[in-house]
Amino acid sequence: PKPNEGLFRHCGIDFDVRNPQKVTLSQQGFVEHMQPMTVPNSDPLYFLNEVEKTEYRSLVSAMAWTTRTRMDAAGQIGILQSRQVSPRTADVKQANMLLAKMKATADTQKLVYGYLPEPLRTLAVTDASHRTLPNDGSMGAFVLLLQSDAGGLSGKVQIMQFGARRLRRVTKSSFGSETLAGVNGCEAAPGLAALLLDLQTPNATARRLQDRLDIGDGISIDLVVDCESLSGAMRTSHDVSDSSSQLYINGLRDELASRRLRSANWVDTKDMMID
């Protein structure tokens, strides 16, 4: 084989497919090529002019593209994106600091995909932070993982999709924020499950694939949260104390009852902010 066979770049992502059992994706070159923005004013509260806004948005948009392979910066980039309408000098400094951090770790942040024995399942791992953004906004995040269904949650996983963004609805409590993040993860997971099922059964019609997904026949979807009261509420029929979240809880319960969502799992974490 040629020296560089199996190595290529597509849309700023470097692929290494020389070993089919270990496929690697990296954006190291893309990150190292980015340049920080010149700080326009010493006053941290100075609002950027139109030219400076364009430069700020260009930098933040380029940083956002790195979330194709980097989960570590997704939350901070989401905050910077939320300030694109009226960015200040302080936001430019934050963007430059984040870029410097990303450059320092560019050679270690990679996605590596290996072999997973079938049957497979999709894990939707969700989390939220309540009222941590400007104007009392809340942040929600999810990660979609592919895992062999033969073992427990502690087995090897492959990162397939992830996202972090400001929750579009106002929440009254940490429970509400966690619930909305769970809904977002459950809404994203069926798309991945459908894609995987399509790859496994290439001759099936779209209708047949959808019918299998509707009854939970195919790639199973399991929700994983660090909010014990959320996972508990999904498995009961009682009303929740946060009435604004009741509609979303009912929707998640319906997903469980229909088997489109196989299970809701609570996992302990070191830094739990709710319960």
Image (spheres, helix red, strand yellow):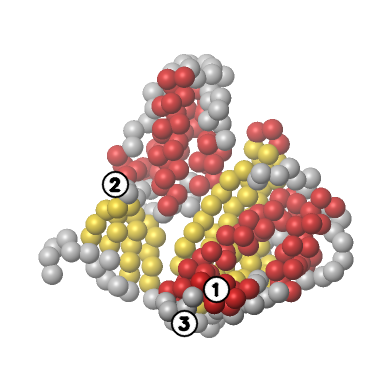
Q: In the figure, is residue 47 to the left or right of 17?
A: right
Disc number lying in front (2 or 3):
3
Disc number placed over residue 121 in the picture, else none: none
Q: In which quarter of the image is residue 113?
A: bottom left
**Who is closer to the viewer here, 44 or 126?**
126
Say above or below: 97 vs 75: above
Residue occupying the point 74% across, 62% down: 251
Pair 1/3: label in front: 1
Q: How crowded is mark 1: few (under 14 residues within 10 Å), some or many (20 or more)?
A: few
Residue 170 % position (x, y): 73, 42
For the residue marked with disc 3, what is the amino acid?
A: Glu
Tell me the kind of residue under disc 2.
Gly
Tell me if residue 12 can be seen: yes
Q: In this view, does 191 lie above or below 43?
A: below
Tell me residue 144's x, y (percent).
53, 63
Q: Is residue 270 visible?
A: no
Residue on which disc 3 sits: 118
Indicate whether 146 appears above or below 134: below
Which residue position is annotated with label 1?
207
Tell me the element at label 2. Answer: helix
Q: Badge 3: few (under 14), some or many (20 or more) residues near its Cα, within 10 Å? A: few
Numbered disc 3: secondary structure: loop
Which circle marks residue 29 in the picture? 2
